[in-house]
Image (cartoon, rainbow, N blue to C red):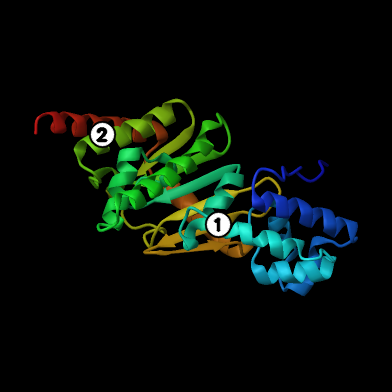
Amino acid sequence: MPGPKKLDPSSSPRALLGAELRHRREAAGLSQEDLGAPLFVSGSFVGQLEAGTRRMQLDQAQKLDDVLGAAGFFVRNCAALKQSKYPDHFAEAAEAEREATVIKEYAPLLIPGLLQTEAYARAVFRAYQPTATEDVINALVAARLERAQILADPTTPLLWVVLDEAVLRREAGGRSVMAEALLHMLTLARQHRVILQVLPFSAGAHMALQGSLKLMFFPEAPALAYLQGLGTGQLQDDPATVRHHELTYDLVAAGALSPGASLALLESMAEDYAHDDQHL
């Protein structure tokens, strides 16, 4: 049986804390369940902290310093985790995204951030914040494009996205922007970097009608589910809850067009957007 994944402490503050937490816990002869008890969390949550898939909170850092005799190490370094380019409700999910080996996402309204072009992202952020300065919008766009760099790896994470048909028909930024955005997704799919499906309007009612869903899977930590709403987001790790969301995603994907038919639809719509824009 393979041993624990070797974390690179230099890769991120969470990796640093995770590696140190595992080292100190094992040196103390404690199991993950043993250490979770005084923190009032499960052993699996301790494993998520060690794997870098969850963010350590200040009260947890204080307790860990006490239990493991860390002389304030965790409290001092926990502050670095609060420095994020993302909104508070999304920061932890964005960090977990970087550690995931498989990501499955259902997008009901917009192209997912990992697949957005610069022009599309700019149009979306401008719609979100119509009175923001250009500097603010530029920073948001830069952070979104930086997130997408996880796709620079040719194989990891495996990204499987189901797009609602509404995503393709909502003209964010205009027709030329939409043409470019759809062609970008087509390119990634044809390079075998992402699996794309489209859930057509004809599919009718389904389990994910209430909003977006992102599932993230890790080699040595339990899966997470992220649900996002208007200015809010929830990262869920309860195993039963995550299994329910996995079922939701599976049924949505089962009702979607096949990957081949989905790409044909994307290509047709991209051509329509580009053609119509040329004749305006």
- Which residue is at 28% across, 43% downward? 168
Query: Quadrant location of the N terminus?
Result: top right
Occupied quadrant, residue 257: top left
- Give the labeled residue for mark 1: 83
Relative to the observer, which residue lies in front, 187 or 65? 65
Query: Quadrant location of the C terminus?
Result: top left
- Which residue is at 63% across, 61% downward? 79
C-beta proximity under 8 Å, tags 1 and 2:
no
Asked whether the viewer can see residue 191, the reply is yes
Relative to the observer, which residue lies in front, 262 or 255? 262
Asked whether the viewer can see residue 200, the reply is no
Mark 1 crowdedness (10 Å alpha carbons): few <14, some 14-19, many ≥20: few
Q: Is residue 233 left or right of residue 134?
A: right
Q: Is residue 221 left or right of residue 210?
A: right
- Give the labeled residue for mark 2: 179
The alpha-carbon separation of the residues under discs 1 and 2 comes to 35 Å
